[in-house]
Amino acid sequence: MAFRLSRFVPLCSAVISLLVFPKLAEPSTAPAAGVLALRNSSWPSVQVEIRLGPSSQCALYPTHAIRTLKQGEVWAVVSNDVVCWRRETSPGAQPLKWTSWQSRPVPSAGVDDVTL
């Protein structure tokens, strides 16, 4: 009797968990996020701003982040959205002025490498 119960309890636990947590049993339907790698190869240091959204209308979306990239550094942006970015027009100059927006949809697989 103990042998049969020891096989029955894990089975009951598995069935209960499928009923209580059905989403855990289903495969994910969300698309895999890709990577857009923004690379600073040109300046000792440059500020870069990114925005994420469903289209290339970059001005419509809030700033996601601003980073300073040193020469040779890469900012790997992982997203399912279109990535918009701009950089300083003259790195280090005051007042800070930005280039026009650039945008690119992130690949569904792999890395898209962009040199600033």
Image (cartoon, rainbow, N blue to C red):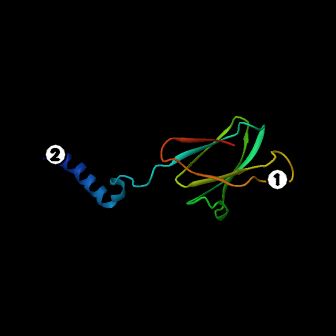
* Mark 1 burial class by Cα count in 10 Å: few <14, some 14-19, many 20+: few
- Quick one: 11 or 9, which is closer to the camera? 11
Q: Is residue 95 visible?
A: yes
Q: Residue at x 87, y 51 (%)?
A: 94
Q: Is residue 21 visible?
A: no
Describe residue 4's horizontal placement relative to residue 67 as left or right. Answer: left
Q: Residue at x 72, y 55 (%)?
A: 100
- Quick one: 87 or 70, which is closer to the camera? 87
* Mark 2 burial class by Cα count in 10 Å: few <14, some 14-19, many 20+: few
Among the two numbered marks 2 and 1 on one chain, the one whose residue lies closer to the N terminus: 2
The quadrant in which residue 20 appears is bottom left
- Rendered location of residue 48, percent (x, y): 71, 48
Dot 2: element: helix
The disc labelled 2 sits on which kind of residue? Ala
Q: Across the whole image, how many numbered discs are drawn on residues?
A: 2
The disc labelled 1 sits on which kind of residue? Leu
In this view, the residue farthest toward the top is 72
The residue that mark 1 highlights is 96
- Nearer to us of marks 2 and 1 is 1
**Disc 2 to disc 1: CB gap under 8 Å:** no
The residue that mark 2 highlights is 2
The quadrant in which residue 64 appears is bottom right
| Distance of label 2 from label 1 (alpha carbons) | 75 Å
In this view, the residue farthest toward the bottom is 60
**Image height check: is 25 above or below 111?**
below
Describe residue 32's horizontal placement relative to residue 66 as left or right. Answer: left
Dot 1: element: loop
